[in-house]
Image (cartoon, helix red, strand yellow):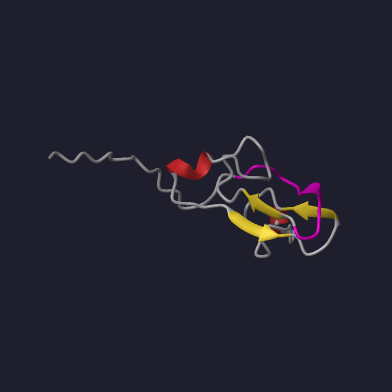
Amino acid sequence: MECYTTVTKMKIMTSPKRAGNEPKAIELKKGESYAWCACGLSSNQPFCDGSHMSTNITPHVFVAENDGTHYMCMCKNSKGKPFCDGSHNE
């Protein structure tokens, strides 16, 4: 019996790609689960579309604590991920 393995080339990212220079206002629903793009490669910003699969960065999955407008980090440098903390101004 022969075994075959597939070797996947992974792009090692030392920092995420900046997806924007200001936060994006998003309506979230309390109790809903979301996957925030942490690599910056998603074409569905600020949410994950699976583009990270070829990298060493994984999305930040979270459950919304309340309904309403939330300001999502687009620079990918917030210490309060996935929400903006003003890091895009630094």
Residue at the farthest front position = 1
- Looking at the picture, does residue 12 appear above or below residue 49? below
Rendering coords of residue 37 (x, y %): 61, 48
**The C terminus lies in which quarter of the figure?**
bottom right
**Range drawn in magenta:** 18-31
- Looking at the picture, does residue 11 appear above or below residue 63? above
Q: Is residue 68 left or right of residue 48?
A: right
Res. 40 image quadrant: top right
Residue at the farthest right position = 68
In front of the other: 39 or 1: 1
Q: Residue at x 55, y 47 (%)?
A: 39
Rendering coords of residue 57 (x, y %): 49, 52
Q: Is residue 57 left or right of residue 25?
A: left
Whether residue 30 appears in magenta in the rendering, the answer is yes
In front of the other: 7 or 22: 7
Whether residue 15 appears in magenta in the rendering, the answer is no
Q: Which residue is drawn at 72% across and 58% down?
A: 83
In front of the other: 44 or 67: 67
Q: Main secondary structure of the magenta part?
A: loop
Number of marks: 0
Q: Which residue is drawn at 75% across and 47% down?
A: 22
Res. 9 image quadrant: top left
In front of the other: 13 or 46: 46
Q: Which residue is drawn at 43% across and 41% down?
A: 54
Rendering coords of residue 71 (x, y %): 79, 53
**The N terminus lies in which quarter of the figure?**
top left
Rendering coords of residue 21 (x, y %): 71, 45
- Looking at the picture, does residue 52 appear above or below residue 79? above
